[in-house]
Image (tube, rainbow, N blue to C red):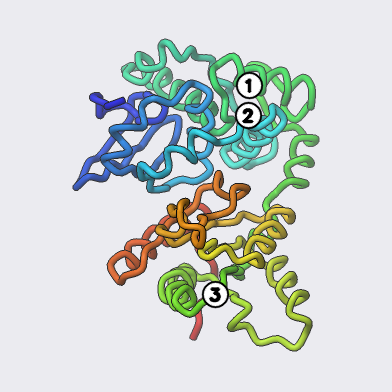
Amino acid sequence: MSRQNIDVCPICHIKSKIENRVDLYSVHCPKCGFFQISGTAFATFGDFNPRQQANISGWIRENQSYLFSSDDKKMLSDLNTPQIGEKAKKLLVHLSYKYPIAGLEFAFPNFMLTNITEFLNSKDISLKTGASEFLDYLGYSWSINENELRFIFKKYLLEEKGFISGHPNYIITPKGWAYLDEIRDINVNADVVFIASKYEENINKYLDKYVVSALEELGYKPKLMRSHPHTNIIDNEMISLIKKSRFVIVDLTENSLGAYYEAGYAQGLGLEVIYTCEKSFRENKNNESLKGVHFDTSHYPINDWEFGDNQGMDFKKKMLDFINVKFGKGTYYPE
């Protein structure tokens, strides 16, 4: 399906601010947030069904500044739909960041998607602001429509769980704040980032040159077992480093079983895992010696890289932008 209208988001079809430069579109969508997308992907991403659109908008809200290529279409189409409780958690977390002071009141906007473009174009600033806020909540909660969003907010968070109270202005309740304390990201002030990969010379050199250097520029302390001095049992030391990490980077090139184990362990702790892989390895599914990444991981977003200085610098910039937006900067800078 070819897209003709370049004034609407290629994911959710909401009117958006879109900048185009040299086959690359920067999209500022009131529902999805900010992302970048290649010209080819922009032209072919218009045929997602409503459930897929909701899932993709939610995923982008959690992965701002992501650069999409046409290769990402299958991954996006196959995103799993969260359960209602998980959607409610996502919305509550977003509300807590938007209204971080306990007792601070906020309104819940009531709009209909069928009229949303009209409201976004309105000269009435209150209507325009309310419409943008409504789309913001839709995106963060992975909601398919206004009915699901209202159910999550009023029936689940307010009536069932008691995490929110009030009407027409609302607050997050003490019970809601207590729940948020239980589920907050772990190691939010950590500077360590564990990197897992296959111990292979070309891969090691690439990761050192472009990934390790990117982390250090952002103020993080990269930790790779091949270069980490230790006197303990190596497995115990590796587990200790993962537990101390702000997030974990796992390179799937050549399918290291250890890297898969370390990814699973990190996810079990609740840590974010960023997956990377050499592009030709990930795409090769016919050669028996190069089977691509394992099926259990293939549906996660994987950041492709390619050998070569120009490609490496492009990949480094992508990682710098992605990590900076998602996690911010650390405080470690090597002497």
Q: Are marks 2 and 1 in contact (CB under 8 Å)?
A: yes
Q: Residue 188: which disc?
A: none
- Label 3 vs label 2: CA separation? 37 Å
Give the residue at x 46% y 15%: 113
Q: Residue furthest left?
A: 22
The structure residue drawn at horizontal position 60% and vertical position 81%, both measured from the top left corner, is 226
**Residue at point 69%, 34% (across, down):** 86
Which one is in front, 146 or 11?
A: 11
Can you give x and y, in whole percent of width and height, for residue 321 in the image?
A: 41, 57
Q: Secondary structure at mark 1?
A: strand
**203 over 24 or under it: above or below:** below
N-term-proximal mark, 3 vs 2: 2
Q: Which residue is mark 3?
A: 332
Q: Which of the marked residues, 1 or 3, is nearer the chain's N terminus? A: 1
Where residue 85 sits, quadrant-wise, is top right
* Tag 2 residue: 105
Q: Nearer the viewer, residue 10 or 328?
A: 10
Q: Is residue 28 left or right of residue 85?
A: left
Question: Mark 2 or 1 closer to N-term?
Answer: 2
Q: Residues within 10 Å of mark 1 (few under 14, many from 20)?
A: few
- The residue identified by callout 1 is 169
Q: Nearer the viewer, residue 285 or 334?
A: 285
Q: Nearer the viewer, residue 204 or 61?
A: 204
CA distance separating discs 2 and 1: 6 Å
- Which amino acid does the dot numbered 3 rest on? Tyr
In the image, residue 291 above or below residue 182: below
Look at the numbered discs 1 and 3 and tell me whether their residues touch, using CB distance below 8 Å.
no
| Amino acid type at mark 2 | Glu
